Amino acid sequence: MQHSIRVGVRVEGVVQGVGFRPYVHGLAHRFGLSGRVGNDTAGVFMEIEGAEQAVSEFLATLPAQAPPLAVIEQVRTHLLAPTGEPGFHIVSSHAAGRRDTLISADTATCADCLREMADPADRRFEYPFTNCTNCGPRFTIVRDVPYDRLFTTMAPFEMCQACSREYHDPADRRFHAQPVCCPACGPRLRLIDANGAELPGEPIAAAAELLRAGVVLAVKGLGGFHVAALAADAVATAELRARKHREDKPFAVMVADLDAARQLCEIDPVGEQVLSGRRRPVVLLTKRPDAPVAPAVAPGNRNLGLMLPYTPLHHLLLRDTAAPIVLTSGNISDEPIAYQDDDARQRLTGIADAYLTHNRAIHMRTDDSVVRVFRGAELPVRRSRGYAPEPLTLAQPVPCPILGCGAELKSTFCLARGRHAFISHHIGDLENYETLRSFTEGVEHFRRLFDITPEIVAHDLHPEYLSTKYAVDLADVELVGVQHHHAHIASCLADNREVGPVLGVAFDGTGYGSDGTLWGGEFLLTDLTRFQRMAHLVPVPLPGGTAAIRQPWRMAASYLGSDAPQDLIQRNAKHWDAVLAMASRGVNSPMTSSAGRLFDAVAAILGIRDSINYEGQAAVELEQRADLTELGSYSASITEGAPLQVHGVDLVQAVVADLRAGVTPEAIATRFHHGLADTIVRVCLMLRDITGIDVAALSGGVFQNVLLLERTVAALENVGFRVLTHSRVPPNDAGISLGQVAVAAATAQSGCRTR
Ligand code: ZN
Ligand code: ZN
Ligand code: FE
């Protein structure tokens, strides 16, 4: 008889809720091994016993053939004494001890589940909650760890015999799939009217009927309620917009499949991959001119945000409507998305005419993610459902647990321990009580899920941000204030698993500068520990403070004074003189070097928009106005010194000159983008001469602008720079929390209590 050995194995990474134990069970069978496998707070543990040869083959195969959703980060083994115990068992979870477990993100319905749902002979035929170990809800239903049904919102649903058999059969695809269910035992749909009365008929077919009749329908999804209307229905979409008090911000559109997507947008192969991948974000794509989409869906927008169905419910609904639908978050303007049934009914009163809802609770509110595609990779705009809470792996482990509190707009937080940075789902704009509560509850939930008690808390320097106030209120932690644009560049470094030094170009709306003025057009020589402001846009007054952010024409007034074009002055005649006076006397006019405000000025001068309804709108529309076939560029002068002064006003004046010469706004918009990109490159070249650094990192919300990004990256590479851009976290303020963590990890002074 061959010599038997027993080996203890520990696997860390995303290994719970992804079918790992059944996989191990099957593998052990294949190699004729006995032993056990289970989940604990650190991941998956197992004991494997059998012939030495078979055990080593088992260990070699283990990572290679792991289930699709598993992310194995580490496998450790140690020898044990053989026990001779026959068979292979899945043992129950150990809840005690420190939690190192990773929880996977919610995942789009897999092909196997879709096949079952389409098969009239299958017991899950057309069942809208079908899922398996390879797909379905995860983060949004998890209340606590370890990831077991008991600790999810599926706990109230007792499995029927058939489901229980699948759940306990190691050979089954649903073996230990925590949300497993079927029509006999699982959640049920209901279609109710605005008063809560149940509407007759099969809920999905009846809901589709309503949509086709022009009704605005609330739909309970994975991470919250959406409101839906037929995308081609001009009346319903306009009504939806009016009811939501959302004036211009584009709505996302869900289409049944890639074929339907191609009828609305131009999509390259990478775009198709992202659209149909397991994360299913909204992908911003170029709208086809003939796309059958009502004007109210994305007013003034060349792009359209598309997504494919990611739950069985969506698949069935899209099949029955047989047409694309708007699917936008269920809330009024900027409040967090509604996710609890009673709350949704209350908050969506007056918005939705009917509700397609169900009795599986959502534990964690999670908005749809949004991405653009840049150079064959994702450029995240919002990283949330389908991504959170999967951690980013850092270049180096953090010295002790850290919390990054983020900034204000597009808020996220980030908790880090070891090499893992857990960036939260999208919280929203942290400027009201609802969102702040969402933030604080989110931090508590993440702390519990990942068992992280932060010893260092990093925050923005802006004293008025609610995230800053939250941080300084915490007791018994080391506080680290991180300058906003330093955090932007650090976030880009962490995104690329690098540590610098780099020449960081941080262009955004505004952030609090170390000198108390508002920064936003910054060139920083930086690594994770410190930064030096090497160059910046010449500051101009922000007349009226936040009023100037809402009214881009004020920035045109600030840049040009009485040299502004007459029609711009006339359009805003009522307040023009007062705003000029305010700017020149410095009354309620903080100085800002913001690049975002430079875009605002140009957009107003071109007549694109004098006031905005959502953050960054003027810049978004200026990018869209550009005619990509146009050539030409403008030039901004740069004054030597430390720091270098970059004269944005030159670009603004070039815009006015071209406008007076009869050049089209489309051509001017292009030349402005080119001019700004070329200016960035010239500054970087000067800074390379001074510093010898030939790596550039581009971050800040302005670099969501793909036209600017493409031109800047190409031109920098042309002159020999290596260029870092974002592909894992957004360049906008959603990435700040990660940047804060990276800086705090590198600069923390105090000794850590834990390792
Ligand atoms: Zn599945
Ligand atoms: Zn069942
Ligand atoms: Fe920013």
Image (spheres, rainbow, N blue to C red):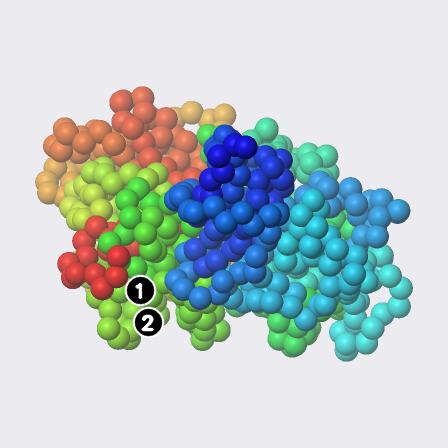
Q: In front here: 553 or 256?
A: 256
In the image, taking residue 510 as reference, residue 40 lies left or right, namely right
Instruction: Find the residue positioned furthest to the left.
Output: 641
Q: Quadrant of residue 512?
A: bottom left
Q: Quadrant of residue 273?
A: top right
Q: Quadrant of residue 279?
A: top right
Indicate which disc residue 189 carries.
Answer: none
Rendering coords of residue 753 (x, y %): 22, 64
Q: In front here: 602 or 591?
A: 591
Rendering coords of residue 710 (x, y %): 41, 31
**Residue under pointer 2:** 470
Rendering coords of residue 620 (x, y %): 47, 46
Check disc 2 and give the amino acid type.
Tyr
Q: In front here: 598 or 420?
A: 420
- Exactly how many numbered labels are in the figure? 2
Mark 2, Cα crowd under 10 Å, few <14 / some 14-19 / many 20+, is some
Rendering coords of residue 574 (x, y %): 42, 64
**Residue under pointer 1:** 454
